[in-house]
């Protein structure tokens, strides 16, 4: 028996269960022990007794049979805290599983721990009044990003191999980039949400150590559910056909735009991303197309309208709960209360339409855009969001400017490890694809994984 959690990917862990090399109860026990000893602060709730009981009778023939599952605290698990990472909602308990959790359970995964998130998923730094600061396993003074910070820190830090994540403005891709993981934001509707739909730019997903792990996750969780009227019909065989389309990648038109026409990058990040993108393009054998990309600035409108859902969650607790909120979330609501009127909503809707037109025109010219995932490597785990990136000044809206356009437009995008900067921290390469191109993005990811293998954990 080993006392260390599995350091490989999820697919290899399931193979180890099936061969008898390892037993699910060993893995659950190792995960619980690692979480207990951990200093990353990646976990905010543990359901150890139930997980150990489920491990005894786990059906390892299932896709995730016997695998300890870490669930981001913004995704409901029946009987677990349902706090949205907020002191204001600390008394709430979920009464039902979210749809992805239902499907993961049926596929054999064992909900074991809940991972930390930024409050209401609002920023890309996982620090809250409820749980404190979550830390990046590559450098513990730095953030793992957000809002799926606990999931990314735990997977990269070796605590567990399977964790859910969600992405309303970059919250899968940003922490994946900061922590050296794979992070796929599927097409809007690919994975159903509910029973509560929440932010209508947000999608469910995972952060993983390998491309095939994400392919298997998508196989298990995708497909229409009538509780989510925006969900898409089921697609079969992401893992089974993984790699079959690599030869076809040569036919793609690809642009390399590190800043995605909207963000200010630290010079070293831009250099690493550009070199990785050129290497990937060469491996694909695809045609490079130079485009003059200028995406409208969307972060202000995205943040302003996002405050509507935040205010809805708080209900009649507001404004009495104002002091319970983190500063940015309180300021977001207070600003929205002052600024949101018909004129403001018209302006936000105009920005959304401008962004959609710009993205559509971009994809008229190219099939794929290669860009940075984040403007720089991971910043401090606590304190204000940065406004200077490698000596280049911007504003707080620069954090997320590379990722939010795909949330507004609804297209698929994936972050892949591009290498490490001089500070030792990972840099993410973002592959921005069109709607319904998850298989193509997974094939690109697999080709990159073969071309430039990455460390599975920090």
Image (spheres, rainbow, N blue to C red):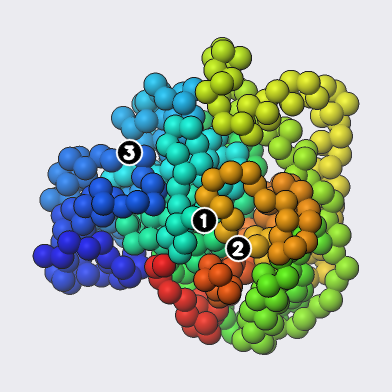
Q: Is residue 43 left or right of residue 191?
A: left
Q: Nearer the viewer, residue 324 or 438?
A: 324
Q: Nearer the viewer, residue 248 or 339?
A: 339
According to the image, label 2 marks what residue? 377
Residue at the spot 38% in from the left edge and 60% down from the top edge: 157
Which secondary structure lies at badge 2?
loop
2 or 3: mark nearer the eye: 2
Disc 2/disc 3 C-alpha distance (Å): 28 Å
Circle 1 packing at 10 Å, graded few (<14), some (14-19), many (20+), is many
Disc 1/disc 3 C-alpha distance (Å): 22 Å
**Residue 162 shows in this picture:** yes
**Percent coordinates x, y for residue 372 in the rendering:** 67, 66
Circle 3 packing at 10 Å, graded few (<14), some (14-19), many (20+), is some
Is tag 1's residue or tag 3's residue first in the polypeptide sequence? 3
Disc 2/disc 1 C-alpha distance (Å): 9 Å
**Residue 195 shows in this picture:** no
Q: Where is the C terminus found, in terms of image quarters?
A: bottom left
Residue at the spot 25% in from the left edge and 70% down from the top edge: 15
Q: Is residue 340 left or right of residue 66?
A: right
Q: Where is the N terminus found, in terms of image quarters?
A: bottom left
Q: Nearer the viewer, residue 301 or 242?
A: 301
Which secondary structure lies at badge 1?
loop
User: Is 365 placed above or below 25 here?
Assistant: below
Q: Is residue 100 left or right of residue 14?
A: right
Q: Are marks 2 and 1 in contact (CB under 8 Å)?
A: yes
According to the image, label 1 marks what residue? 142
User: For residue 320, which numbered disc appears in the image?
Assistant: none
**Percent coordinates x, y for residue 309 in the rendering:** 63, 28
User: Is 430 placed above or below 383 here?
Assistant: below
Circle 2 packing at 10 Å, graded few (<14), some (14-19), many (20+), is many
Q: Nearer the viewer, residue 179 or 250?
A: 179
According to the image, label 3 marks what residue? 45
């Amino acid at each position: 028996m080993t006392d260390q959690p599995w350091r490989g990917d999820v697919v290899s862990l399931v193979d180890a269960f099936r061969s008898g090399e390892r037993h699910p109860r060993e893995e659950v026990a190792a995960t619980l022990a690692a979480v207990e000893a951990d200093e990353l602060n990646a976990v905010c709730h543990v359901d150890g007794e139930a997980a150990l009981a489920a491990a005894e009778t786990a059906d390892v023939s299932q896709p995730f049979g016997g695998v300890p599952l870490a669930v981001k605290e913004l995704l409901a698990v029946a009987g677990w805290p349902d706090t949205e990472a907020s002191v204001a909602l600390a008394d709430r308990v979920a009464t039902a599983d979210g749809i992805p959790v239902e499907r993961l359970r049926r596929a054999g995964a064992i909900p074991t721990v809940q991972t930390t998130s930024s409050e209401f998923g609002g920023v890309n730094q996982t620090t809250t009044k409820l749980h404190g600061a979550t830390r990046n396993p590559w450098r513990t003074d730095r953030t793992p990003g957000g809002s799926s910070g606990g999931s990314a820190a735990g997977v990269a830090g070796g605590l567990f191999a399977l964790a859910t994540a969600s992405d309303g403005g970059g919250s899968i891709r940003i922490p994946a980039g900061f922590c050296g993981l794979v992070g796929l934001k599927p097409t809007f509707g690919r994975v159903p949400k509910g029973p509560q739909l929440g932010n209508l730019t947000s999608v469910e997903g995972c952060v993983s150590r390998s491309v095939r792990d994400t392919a298997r996750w998508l196989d298990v969780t995708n497909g229409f559910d009538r509780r989510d009227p925006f969900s898409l019909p089921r697609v079969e065989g992401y893992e089974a056909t993984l790699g079959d389309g690599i030869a076809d990648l040569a036919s793609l038109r690809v642009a390399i735009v590190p800043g995605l026409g909207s963000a200010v990058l630290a010079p070293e990040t831009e250099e690493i991303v550009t070199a990785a993108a050129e290497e990937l393009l060469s491996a694909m054998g695809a045609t490079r197309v130079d485009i003059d990309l200028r995406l409208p600035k969307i972060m202000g409108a995205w943040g302003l309208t996002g405050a509507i859902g935040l205010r809805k969650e708080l209900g009649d607790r507001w404004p009495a709960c104002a002091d319970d909120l983190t500063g940015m979330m309180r300021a977001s609501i207070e600003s929205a209360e002052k600024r949101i009127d018909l004129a403001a909503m018209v302006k936000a809707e105009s920005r959304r339409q401008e962004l959609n037109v710009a993205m559509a025109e971009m994809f008229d010219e190219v099939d794929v855009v290669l860009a940075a995932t984040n403007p720089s490597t991971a910043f401090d785990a606590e304190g204000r969001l940065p406004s200077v990136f490698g000596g280049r000044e911007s504003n707080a809206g620069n954090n997320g400017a590379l990722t939010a356009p795909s949330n507004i437009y609804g297209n698929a995008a994936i972050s892949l490890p591009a290498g490490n900067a001089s500070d030792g921290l990972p840099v993410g390469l973002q592959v921005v694809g069109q709607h319904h191109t998850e298989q193509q993005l997974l094939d690109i990811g697999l080709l990159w994984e073969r071309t430039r293998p990455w460390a599975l954990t920090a």
